[in-house]
Image (cartoon, rainbow, N blue to C red):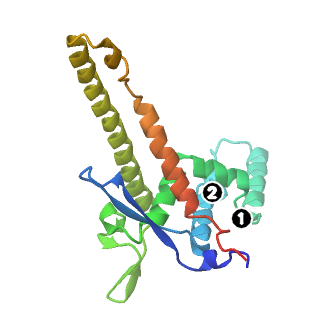
Amino acid sequence: MDGIANLGGTRQFTVEDYFVNSKFETQSYTFKSIMLDGFAEREQYILGLKPNPLLIIAALPNSLDADKRSEIARLAMEEFSKPQFVDEETETKFLDSTKGIAFRLWQSLRDNHEELGMVVDGKPAKYKINGQQYTLTPSAGINAALAFLDRQIRYRIQLAKNHNASAAQFREERLANDDTEYAEHEFDVSEQDYVDQMMIRLRTILDATEEKDIVGN
């Protein structure tokens, strides 16, 4: 077996009590693995980020020299006619960006967590209403995922602040009792370190949703 079942089947896993909801309370979140249609959806979105050659031509100023206009139009149409695909470098750059992380979050959480606000026109994503299929648009989904991501970052910063406030109080109490040895053992933590640790874990989780080689022989 080559793991192809992971691309066509459905797998999901739950991360318990690590991420926070809109009330800044930890809760469990279920991440769904990305399948073939998800990779196609991502590629289509990344391709949509490229400038539209036709719009470039339409935006050319009337004062532009005719020969230059013709050359730009030729190059634009030449680009437009090329096979459309996303190379590895472009995909990696996108996945490493904040928007790329948000896109992956949207893809992996949207089916299990309507409460994240990943809806369009007030209707949950991927639901049928009166026989009509409603699918969440990437722009709305990414905005919802960005809000989720921002919440996790603010929560980690607050955790660091709480730790440092407790550490400062501990040091003051120890020093008041001339207990300098124990006072020196309570260090402040970096807010950025807390955020970085969360982002590393999140990236690890998202990478796991795209693991294609889990099925063994």
Three-letter amino acid code at the position of disc 2 = Asn
- In which quadrant of the rendered view does residue 140 lie? bottom left
Q: Position of residue 55 (x, y in %)?
A: 60, 55
Which tag, 2 or 1, sits closer to the chain's start?
2
| Crowd band around label 1 with a 10 angstrom C-alpha radius: few (<14), some (14–19), many (20+) | few
Q: Position of residue 74 (x, y in %)?
A: 78, 55
The Cα–Cα distance between marks 2 and 1, rounded to whole angstroms, is 12 Å
Residue that extends furthest to the bottom in the rendered view of this protein: 131
In this picture, is 106 found above or below 5? above
| Crowd band around label 2 with a 10 angstrom C-alpha radius: few (<14), some (14–19), many (20+) | some
In this picture, is 123 found above or below 88? below
Q: Look at the image and tell me in which quarter the C terminus lies.
A: bottom right
- In which quadrant of the rendered view does residue 48 lie? bottom right
- In which quadrant of the rendered view does residue 139 lie? bottom left
Three-letter amino acid code at the position of disc 1 = Gln
Residue pictured at 37% horizontal, 24% vertical:
188
Residue that extends furthest to the top in the rendered view of this protein: 178
- Regarding mark 1 in the picture, which secondary structure is present there? loop
Residue pictured at 42% horizontal, 28% vertical:
190
Residue highlighted by disc 1: 84
Residue pictured at 60% horizontal, 51% vertical:
94
Q: Position of residue 78 (x, y in %)?
A: 78, 59
Q: Position of residue 115 (x, y in %)?
A: 30, 65
Q: Nearer the viewer, mark 2 or mark 1?
A: 1
- Regarding mark 2 in the picture, which secondary structure is present there? loop
Q: Look at the image and tell me in which quarter the N terminus lies.
A: bottom right
Asked whether residue 59 is in view, the answer is: no
Along the viewing direction, whichever of 187 and 147 lies nearer the viewer: 187
Q: Is residue 92 left or right of residue 22?
A: right
Q: Is residue 10 left or right of residue 54?
A: left
Residue highlighted by disc 2: 52
In this picture, is 117 found above or below 64? below
